[in-house]
Amino acid sequence: MSTSPRTLADDSRCPCGSGDTLGACCGPILRQERRAGTAEALMRSRYTAFATGDIEHLLRTWHPHERPTRSDLESTLTDDARWLRLDIRATSGGGPFDDERTVEFVAIARTARGRQEQHEISRFVREGGAWLYVDGDV
Ligand SMILES: [Zn+2]
């Protein structure tokens, strides 16, 4: 598959379902114009990266200890899933100075095999001011 992301206009609805436009939500994070301020914002930007096929953003925001190889990641994305919706169920962790957080979400996609729901509790850590995805329990 092509590794160049599907481009969406900044004034289109953000795929993560925040209700904001892409330009006011995940767009600047995917373009590295700003960092995700919270684990949830990073989670949303990663969902948008899945939805638009932005492999670079997924790799960049994956903790180096857990990061898959590019080819492994590409093979999981060739499933031609159409990501329909993201529901953030819960976020946990301490206060604003806590550097570890979990985000529970359900992501819904339509694939060749029908409707798929991914329910995951993802772990995030903040290193050097940047939130990173570590791994998740499905
Ligand atoms: Zn968004």
Image: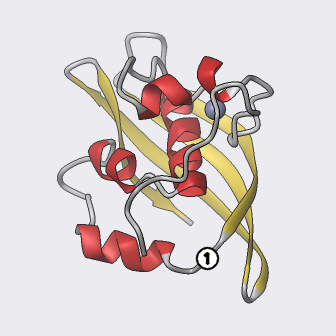
- Residue 108 position (above or below residue 75): above
Q: Could one spot residue 92 in this view of the protein? A: yes
Q: Is residue 10 left or right of residue 33?
A: right
Residue count near mark 1 (Cα–Cα under 10 Å), binned few <14, some 14–19, many ≥20: few
In the picture, residue 99 is in which quadrant?
top left
Image quadrant occupied by the C terminus: bottom right
- Residue 132 position (above or below residue 53): above
- Residue 114 position (above or below residue 5): below
**Disc 1, SS:** loop
Q: Which residue is drawn at the image coordinates 31% and 76% (left, top)?
A: 72
Q: Could one spot residue 93 in this view of the protein? A: no
Image quadrant occupied by the N terminus: bottom left
Q: Identity of the amino acid at label 1?
A: Asp
Q: Which residue is drawn at the image coordinates 63% and 17% (left, top)?
A: 24
Residue furthest out toward the bottom: 113
Which residue bears the numbered disc 1?
A: 80
Residue 30 on image: x %, y %: 44, 34
**Quarter of the rendered structure image containing ligand 1:** top right
- Residue 67 position (above or below residue 98): below
Pick the front one: 71 or 93: 71
Q: Which residue is drawn at the image coordinates 59% and 38% (left, top)?
A: 44
Residue 5 on image: x %, y %: 47, 53
In the picture, residue 91 is in which quadrant?
top right
Residue 66 on image: x %, y %: 25, 58
In the picture, residue 19 is in which quadrant?
top right
